[in-house]
Image (tube, rainbow, N blue to C red):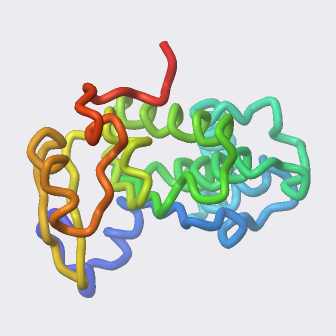
Amino acid sequence: MDGLDVSEHLREVVTRVGMVFQDPDSQILGETVWEDVAFGPENLGLPREEVKDRVRRALDLTDLRDLAHKSCLWLSGGERKRLAIAGVLALNPETLILDEPFANLDYPSTLQVLHQIVRLHAEGHTILLSTHDVEKVVAHVDRIAVLGAGELQLVGPPETVLPRLEDHGVRPPCHHLMGFPVASWIQG
């Protein structure tokens, strides 16, 4: 990563990259939203005030501040996904890797998560997003990479890659198939 051999510089790479898994429950560890987001920074041994600042910032970035004292057990699917993102953000990574962030979410939750991802990218985070739902993100990406058989098959800006998706077994977004311009799922 950035010229670093991961096997030799694992600790440095781990502090620079945050991973959000497809199933948020696999990374939610706290009893409450606040405790869960604080888990990572506390385990880094950061001073108490810095932990509080990081938790507040992460909760603000994911619109979860009002749920800070809510039990993680009572969160919706979208709230859980945003909590997983908040927990990673509290570690201050430069790059976020999101694996199928829209999996098992209803439409309103998908929109909430997509809005947060777009917002984080606009604030300067590098986002690497793995998804089969190309139509949900294509209006917001700089580049698309297609993987097949464990290898990079195609990479480039959306306007170059979209016409070639079917050649690699990926269904293009509906708007592309119908000849319409790229459209965002986010209103306004």
Q: Residue furthest top?
A: 188
Image position of 11 with respect to 31: above or below: below
Rendered location of residue 145, percent (x, y): 21, 59
**The N terminus - image quarter:** bottom left
The residue at the point 51 percent across, 54 percent down is 91
The residue at the point 84 percent across, 55 percent down is 72
The residue at the point 80 percent across, 48 percent down is 76
Q: Is residue 49 in sight in this rendering?
A: no
How many discs appear? Answer: 0
Nearer to me, 160 or 25: 160
Nearer to me, 173 or 14: 173
Q: Quadrant of residue 25?
A: bottom right
The residue at the point 52 percent across, 32 percent down is 115
Q: Is residue 142 left or right of residue 48?
A: left
Image position of 21 with respect to 186: above or below: below
Nearer to me, 150 or 53: 150
Image position of 62 with respect to 106: above or below: above
Rendered location of residue 96, percent (x, y): 41, 54
